[in-house]
Structures are given as C-alpha cells and as structure tokens.
Image (cartoon, helix red, strand yellow):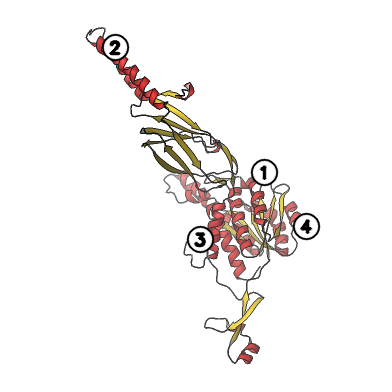
C-alpha cells in the first residue's frame, strides 16, 4: 500500500457520522448512560476509517482513465470530448471525475459522478464550444474514488495535460463542402443555382435529348450524323477568388460569443475550400490600417493549409480601416480580373460614403461583392412588444437603424456593386450561395 497524504480526503459522510458521535458524547454529560455508547461508537468509527483507508490504498485498487479529444478544435462548433474510466479492481467504487478544462472556458464546476462496478469501464462525452482562436491548454484528469462506506476519498491524478489549438471551423468546412457538391441535398441553406446560358469551356459533342438547350445544336455534326447533336460545355475553371478581410475595430463586435471577424474567418475558410474544389484559385488578403496577410490565388495542394494557418493567426486591430491602402495593395497584388469577397461592416451611411470611391475603383477592375452584417440584437429588439412611450421611441430608433442598413445595400447597387447584408450566423451560407450563383451565371 502506497499512502500519499495529498491524495487523502475526508468525505461528507465522515463529518456527518463524526458529528453524530460528538452529539452523543455531549448528551452523555446529563445522561450518563450514553457515555459507553459514545465511546464504543468512537472505537467502531476509527476502525471503519482505518478499514476504508486500507481498502482504498490496497494493492487491489486500480483505476485508469483517458481523455479522447481531437488534435485540433473548431472555432464556434461543439467539439466532442470523451472521457473513459475503467475500474480494474475487484471492488465496486463510487467515482467522481474532474477534468481540468482550458481557462478560456471559465468552467469551475465540471464533474462527473458515477457508480463504477468491479472490472467495468464507463465512458461519457461532453461538448466544448470555443469562441476564440488560439492555444487551449488542458490540464490533468482527477478521479476521486470511494468505497460503499464512503468515509474517505482517494484522489488518483492521470497526467493528461497538453495544448490543443483552436483553428477556424474545420467542421463547417467539411459540412458545407458536402452540401455544395451533393445535388440531392434538401437541407436548408446552400442552394444549387440554375445555370443561365453556358460558359465558353467546350467539353464534347453529344446526342440531343429532350431538355438540352437548342441554341447549343452543332449543325455541322448534325449533318454528318443525320441526327441532332449538341455541344456540351463545362464550368470555366482556374478563376481567381479572393477573400478580403477587414481586421479593424468594426469587426470586433460580438454576436453569439463570436466576433464578426471570427464569423468572417470561418466563412473565408469554407468558401476557399469550395473554390478549390470547383477547380478555381483561392487567395486571401487582410487589412486594417496596414496590409496584413497576402496569399496569392493558387490551386496547389498546400493552398488550403496556407489559408488555414493565416486565418488562425488573424486578430482584430483597435484602429480604423485604411481603404485607400487596401485598394493600392489589391491593385498591386491581385493580377487579372478576380472575384473579390470583401468582409467588412458599415453601421452608418457616412461610413459607407467615405469608402465608396475605393469600392467603385475596385469594382471596375474586378467583380466585387461587399459583405456586411445585420445587427441581430437590434432586429430582435424591434419585435418585442412595447408598453411605454420611451420603449416606443427606442423601438422606432432601432427600426430606423435597420432601414439605414437596407439603404446601404441600395446605394451599393446604384453604383453597380453587389452586396450581401446578412445575419452573422448565416454568413457562410449566404457567401456560398452568392459564389454558386455567380458561377452558374458565368460571371466568373
């Protein structure tokens, strides 16, 4: 038996029984008959504590535990963590498991209590939802075991400490990739757009069937075969698609635990993966008061990994965005006409008017899609019932703010700039749909 004082704990039952014996001894002063009972109880109590200690620290007691968690956690998703505990001894035990979670979660009351029969194992699972990117350090796993007597506890510490990084959502990337490429998907969200016309990438000539575009009939081939033949076209490939990420203070606003930048980071990773799967080229450009990361649009095998690592290291900056510098940087860095998804946010007409010249210049050279966000908290507030005059005034002000957001969309449309006004949680879906729409229309 190996006894460690730091692993020895007195259980609540120990104090309850000890308090009861103490009460009997106190009552023995006026009632002398209780004194022998109290002294006998002390002796029995001491023997039971010694017996419980010998059993818990005996050589037959063996408990093992393990933690199964992914090597990389996904930002903003429920990441499953599994704990497996096995009782290798021949004694039934009551076990309390306490996992040392990373400090970012601020969880101080996590524990799992179960009866663990002899030579049996049990497994339980719980989700972790990180809301910030970075390094998350897990601590050790502590197992507090006790016998049926329940007078004392023994702590068994399993050293499972280690660091796990939280990357942009890989779970969302895989899920939306499947939705985008499976034609039979009926889930709400990603829509497959109907093709308008066709692109100029000729693939082959095939027999005409009902439903084919009669404008694609190849009359020369029809004359040679004496039956209708049509030209088959495929999507144009190797088009450049860039995500322009605003890292300024306007992207620091949190919704649902995630900042607007984190929502944009997740959406940029998902759309970059789909772009690469569509045989196009994906690139990345970040900016605030200066140009940050710049990844040239390519279609190499390592491109997605480059973008993932770059997005992992992006942080909000407490400064105003310099759109003049962004335009100059994009003009020098991006060669050839490209599709640009600009993730930013405008809260007023004045903020948009300041950057309209740069956006118009950018749209002349490329196909620009400006993506900014709807304030869901204000939107929810406008749907609440009002009772006082002050609440009516506040709600009207909130509705006016939402109306101004819609006006920003119309102003961009007047200048021929496409835009997406979206709720933060629907950002990824709306961005994918816009890309598929532009792809189907042959605009890229």
Q: What is the spatial separation of the Cα atoms under label 2 and label 3, in whole angstroms?
A: 74 Å
Are the residues tagged 2 and 1 within 8 Å (C-beta)?
no
Residue drawn at (76%, 58%) of the image:
331
Residue wearing tag 4 = 332
Residue wearing tag 1 = 317
Q: Is residue 7 visible?
A: yes
Task: Identify whether 337 is placed above or below 8.
Answer: below
Nearer the observer, 37 or 374: 37
Instruction: Give x and y (percent) for residue 179.
Output: 52, 62
Q: What is the spatial separation of the Cα atoms under label 4 and label 2, in whole angstroms?
A: 91 Å
Q: Is residue 110 visible?
A: no
Q: What is the spatial separation of the Cα atoms under label 3 and label 4, in whole angstroms?
A: 36 Å
Are the residues tagged 4 and 1 within 8 Å (C-beta)?
no
Circle 3 sits in a helix, a strand or a loop, which is it? Answer: loop
Circle 1 sits in a helix, a strand or a loop, which is it? Answer: loop
Residue drawn at (31%, 14%) of the image:
43
Nearer the viewer's eye, disc 3 or disc 1? 3
Residue wearing tag 3 = 189
Circle 4 sits in a helix, a strand or a loop, which is it? Answer: helix
Which quadrant would residue 371 be assigned to in this image? bottom right
Give the mark nearer the N terminus: 4 vs 2: 2
Give the mark nearer the N terminus: 3 vs 4: 3
Instruction: Give x and y (percent) for residue 156.
Output: 47, 30
Residue wearing tag 2 = 39
Are the residues tagged 3 and 4 within 8 Å (C-beta)?
no
Are the residues tagged 4 and 2 within 8 Å (C-beta)?
no
Circle 2 sits in a helix, a strand or a loop, which is it? Answer: helix
């Amino acid at each position: 038996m190996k006894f460690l004082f730091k692993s020895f704990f007195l259980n609540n039952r120990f104090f309850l029984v000890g308090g009861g014996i103490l009460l009997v001894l106190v009552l023995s002063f006026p009632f002398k008959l209780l004194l022998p009972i109290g002294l006998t109880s002390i002796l029995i109590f001491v023997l039971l504590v010694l017996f419980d200690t010998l059993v818990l620290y005996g050589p037959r007691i063996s408990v093992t535990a393990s933690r199964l968690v992914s090597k990389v956690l996904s930002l903003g998703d429920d990441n499953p963590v599994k704990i497996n505990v096995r009782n290798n001894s021949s004694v039934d035990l009551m076990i309390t498991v306490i996992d040392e979670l990373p400090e970012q979660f601020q969880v101080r009351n996590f524990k799992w209590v179960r009866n663990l029969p002899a030579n049996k194992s049990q497994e339980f699972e719980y989700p972790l939802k990180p809301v910030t990117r970075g390094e998350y350090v897990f601590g050790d796993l502590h197992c507090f075991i006790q016998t049926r007597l329940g007078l004392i506890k023994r702590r068994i510490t399993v050293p499972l400490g280690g660091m796990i990084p939280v990357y942009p959502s890989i779970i969302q990337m895989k899920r939306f990739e499947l939705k985008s490429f499976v034609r039979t998907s009926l889930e709400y969200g990603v829509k497959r757009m109907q093709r308008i016309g066709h692109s100029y990438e000729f693939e082959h000539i095939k027999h005409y069937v009902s439903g084919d575009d009669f404008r694609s009939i190849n009359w020369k081939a029809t004359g040679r075969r004496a039956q209708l033949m049509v030209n088959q076209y495929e999507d144009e490939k190797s088009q450049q698609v860039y995500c322009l990420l605003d890292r300024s203070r306007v992207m620091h606003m949190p919704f649902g635990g995630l900042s607007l930048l984190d929502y944009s980071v997740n959406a940029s990773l998902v759309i970059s993966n789909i772009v690469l799967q569509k045989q196009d080229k994906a690139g990345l450009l970040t900016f605030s008061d200066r140009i940050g990361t710049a990844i040239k649009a390519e279609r190499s095998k390592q491109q997605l990994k480059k973008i993932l690592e770059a997005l992992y290291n992006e942080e909000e900056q407490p400064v105003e965005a310099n759109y003049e510098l962004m335009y100059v940087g994009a003009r020098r860095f991006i060669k050839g006409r490209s599709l640009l998804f600009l993730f930013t946010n405008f809260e007023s007409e004045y903020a948009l008017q300041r950057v309209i010249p740069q956006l118009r210049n950018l749209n002349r050279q490329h196909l620009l899609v400006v993506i900014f966000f709807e304030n869901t908290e204000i939107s929810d507030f406008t749907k609440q019932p009002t009772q006082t005059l002050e609440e009516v005034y506040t709600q009207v002000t909130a509705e006016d703010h939402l109306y101004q957001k819609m006006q920003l969309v119309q102003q961009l449309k007047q200048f021929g700039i496409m835009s997406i006004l979206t709720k933060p949680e629907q950002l990824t879906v709306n961005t994918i749909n816009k890309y598929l729409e532009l792809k189907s229309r042959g605009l890229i």
